[in-house]
Image (cartoon, rainbow, N blue to C red):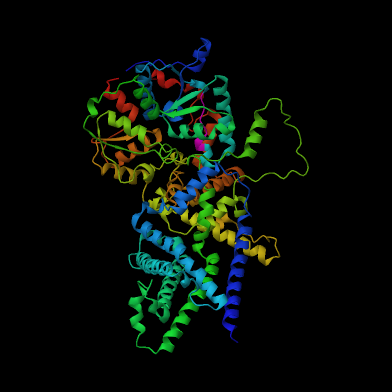
């Protein structure tokens, strides 16, 4: 495949003297991680389908600072935050959408007191709003009637009390949503948060992602739906370890919607 | 001589209360060893939390059995204390059942107390059963050995004894039994004593009365040494608990000032700081580096272990236990407080600190910051904020992050991503390279 997706940047918009409706904050995982890049592309396809006037920062985007802050490096976090804020404020950014709950949480909650106040949405919230406004239609497609379980990302759920938007999108796909025992407020972490993604875990008797994957597999679902690139990686790894990759897929909700519409 | 019992009672009561106030003063002093912290949200939101979470016990009932049992004990504790008021007044004025002049209302009140006392007794036995026979896992983590285990049982025995004494006191009060109003439970206990001579029954009644009130005063003074402080501190703790989204960590102002200076092209980077400027310590290695709310959290913790049982690290066998973080913080704070008391009001360095001597780096680095512990706490304690402040100390004061995290941070510094990819390649995904 040699498809090239049209992705305008904020610089392109500024050159034309225009403002996009929303800035798509891609995030490091969405930019560089092979698995997460697929989520990014799926989401962009949906944005095009809904004729959303969006732009990315491209090479002007830099890590939101979340892993640095959660590691305890407040200096590095604030350096990142202030640099990003300066860039976004210079472009007059008002509204941001991101497919990463970690970037979402940081930009939404921790940037304002450093001078960066924006309306920040997780991509599941944004897609839900496109649906509500009639700008995007979701076809049930191949997922209709399939058993799907949704893994709540900590930084979307407990951290920001967003539990319904991803589930409402899954309902639109007419899936059979099967909840894990630990879901919503009681959802179990995938094991990646707090910068754990970037290090080996401490000695224990099990990896957290295996514990969570076993719980997801026990729902006998065809797809484990995720809303975070890091959860996606952790669950995908877990499914591989359990040798279930032939039966169970781990997919971002944006990917599911795009795939259901043959995008 | 006629006033001797009144005098003895007054002395016992006043000393019990004074001792308690002395403990409260120490508690306040210890909590104020913490740094100042700004409290977020409006008073309205905070009072809503007090009504819902503290008074309303909304988070307790997420685990229905312990939640409902706890509500019984909680209501019993508050309501039966009205009876303590009567006991105190009777003791001081040498009266007997002063409030019985209220007539039928008195019967209703005492009847309610008796029913509640019986229910509390039942609930406390259930609690004891869960800890000692059913052996629920969260009461058997490593941090629950020794004093914490005994403390929990002592509290239950205290409550069992106090409730029994209250019922026996009513059962052996012949004039009260003759009133036949309000003795809904004690009337069934009274027959056990009916074979005894009146003088013995009266003696038992007096003994139960005295032991009941002395027991309450002892219990009041036991609180300071016990996890049971939560019966007082849960309320301010919930009031001051964060109302911001759980994912939001504080931004350190001292760091903001420095970073702004670094990014300010017009700043004088060679300016020397004022001579008396003490460099700010980043993060926390001991309790004095934490803020007073974190210290209040530590004293409020009743070691129920809901946090630890929800913690993904703990569930997968790692050393981290959010409850232990709170217990360690409290134990160290108590040690620092006792040190100050023993040294005429100033802390003498004891070669110990919270980091390392109580909480290990292995525990701190096992946290996924998932907020499960914060969500689980029935009284708005935040173990995560302490973990984060200690990580800040490790990284910013000691450069002691795990090697992989140092690599991740170097990557962010050098190329704006946690992985070693060129920042200029951030848009390559669109070209499918």
As drawn, B398 above or below A82: below
- Frontmost residue, B202 versus B410: B202
Furthest toward the left, the residue is A145
Quarter of the N terminus of chain B within the rendering: bottom right
Taking the view exactly as shown, the residue that stands out farthest to the right is B275
Tell me where residue A123 appears, x and y as whole percent. 40, 28
Residue at the top extreme of this rendering: A16
x then y, percent, for residue B364: 50, 49
Q: Is residue A155 visible?
A: yes
Main secondary structure of the magenta stretch = loop
Q: Is residue A228 left or right of residue B228?
A: left
Residue B83: give x, y in percent of width and height. 47, 69
Residue B19 locus on image (x, y percent): 60, 69
Question: In percent of the image, x 51 and y 54: which residue is there?
Answer: B235
The image quadrant of residue B191 is: bottom left
Vertical relation: B147 (above or below) A47: below
Along the horizontal axis of the image, is A179 left or right of A186? left
Q: Please tell me which residue lies in front, A195 or B150.
A: B150
State whether residue A252 is above or below residue B284.
Answer: above
* Nearer to us in this view, B350 or B133: B133
Range covered by the magenta-colored residues: A61-67
Examine the rendering and report whether any part of residue B355 can be seen: no
Q: Nearer the viewer, residue A160 or B233?
A: B233
Residue B13 position (above or below residue B399): below
The quarter of the image holding the C terminus of chain B is: top left
Q: Place residue A235 in its image quadrant.
A: top left
Q: Per the image, is A196 magenta? A: no
Q: How many marks?
A: 0
Q: Is residue B323 left or right of residue B344?
A: left
């Amino acid at each position: 495949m040699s498809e090239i997706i049209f992705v305008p940047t904020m610089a392109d918009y500024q050159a034309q003297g225009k403002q996009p409706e929303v800035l798509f904050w891609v995030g490091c995982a969405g930019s560089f991680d092979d698995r997460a890049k697929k989520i990014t592309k799926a989401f962009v396809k949906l944005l095009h389908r809904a004729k959303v006037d969006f732009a990315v920062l491209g090479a002007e985007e830099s890590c939101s600072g979340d892993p640095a802050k959660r590691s305890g490096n407040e200096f590095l976090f604030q350096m990142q935050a202030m640099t990003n804020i300066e860039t976004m404020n210079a472009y007059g950014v008002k509204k941001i959408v991101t497919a990463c709950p970690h970037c979402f949480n940081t930009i939404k909650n921790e940037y304002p007191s450093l001078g960066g106040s924006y309306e920040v949405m997780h991509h599941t919230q944004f897609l839900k709003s496109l649906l509500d406004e009639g700008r995007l239609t979701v076809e049930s497609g191949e997922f209709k009637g399939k058993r799907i379980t949704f893994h709540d990302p900590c930084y979307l759920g407990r951290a920001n009390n967003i539990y319904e938007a991803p589930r409402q999108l899954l309902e639109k796909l007419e899936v059979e949503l099967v909840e894990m025992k630990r879901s919503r407020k009681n959802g179990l972490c995938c094991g990646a948060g707090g910068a754990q993604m970037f290090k080996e875990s401490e000695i224990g008797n099990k990896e957290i992602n295996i514990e969570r994957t076993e719980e997801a597999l026990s729902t006998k679902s065809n797809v484990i739906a995720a809303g975070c690139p890091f959860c996606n990686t952790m669950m995908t790894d877990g499914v591989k370890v359990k040798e279930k990759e032939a039966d169970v897929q781990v997919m971002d909700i944006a990917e599911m919607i795009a795939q259901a519409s043959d995008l | 001589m006629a006033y001797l019992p009144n005098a003895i009672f007054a002395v016992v009561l006043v000393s019990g209360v004074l001792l308690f106030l002395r403990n409260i003063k120490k508690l306040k002093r210890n909590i104020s060893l913490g740094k100042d912290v700004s409290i977020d949200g409006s008073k309205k939101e905070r009072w809503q939390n007090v009504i819902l979470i503290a008074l309303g016990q909304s988070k307790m009932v997420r685990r229905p059995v312990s939640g409902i049992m706890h509500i019984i004990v909680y209501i019993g504790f508050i309501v039966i204390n009205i009876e303590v008021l009567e006991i105190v007044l009777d003791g001081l004025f040498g009266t007997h059942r002063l409030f019985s002049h209220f007539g039928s209302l008195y019967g209703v009140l005492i009847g309610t107390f008796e029913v509640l006392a019986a229910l509390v007794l039942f609930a406390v036995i259930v609690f004891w059963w869960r800890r000692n026979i059913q052996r629920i896992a969260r009461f058997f983590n490593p941090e629950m050995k020794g004093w914490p285990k005994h403390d929990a049982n002592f509290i239950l025995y205290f409550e069992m004894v106090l409730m029994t004494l209250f019922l026996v006191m009513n059962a052996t009060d012949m004039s009260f039994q003759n009133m036949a109003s309000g003795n809904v439970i004690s009337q069934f206990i009274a027959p056990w004593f009916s074979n005894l001579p009146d003088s013995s029954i009266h003696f038992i009644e007096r003994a139960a009365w005295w032991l009941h009130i002395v027991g309450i005063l002892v219990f009041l003074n036991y609180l300071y040494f016990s996890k049971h402080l939560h019966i007082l501190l849960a309320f301010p703790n919930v009031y001051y608990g964060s109302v911001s989204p759980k994912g939001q960590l504080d931004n350190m102002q001292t760091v903001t000032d420095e970073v702004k200076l670094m990014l300010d092209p017009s700043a004088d980077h060679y300016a020397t700081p004022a001579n008396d400027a003490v460099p700010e310590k980043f993060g926390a290695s001991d309790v004095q580096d934490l803020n007073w709310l974190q210290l209040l959290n530590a004293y409020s913790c009743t070691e129920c272990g809901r946090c630890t049982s929800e913690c993904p690290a703990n569930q997968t066998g790692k050393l981290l236990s959010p409850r232990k973080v709170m217990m360690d913080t409290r134990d160290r704070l108590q040690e620092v407080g006792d040190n100050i008391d023993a040294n005429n009001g100033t802390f003498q360095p004891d070669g110990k600190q919270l980091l390392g001597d109580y909480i290990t780096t292995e525990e701190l680095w096992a946290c996924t910051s998932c907020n499960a512990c914060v969500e689980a706490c029935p009284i708005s304690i935040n173990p995560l904020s302490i973990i984060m402040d200690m990580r800040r100390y490790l990284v910013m004061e000691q450069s002691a992050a795990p090697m992989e995290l140092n690599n991740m941070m170097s990557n962010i510094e050098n190329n704006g991503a946690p992985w070693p990819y060129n920042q200029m390649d951030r848009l390559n995904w669109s070209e499918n390279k």
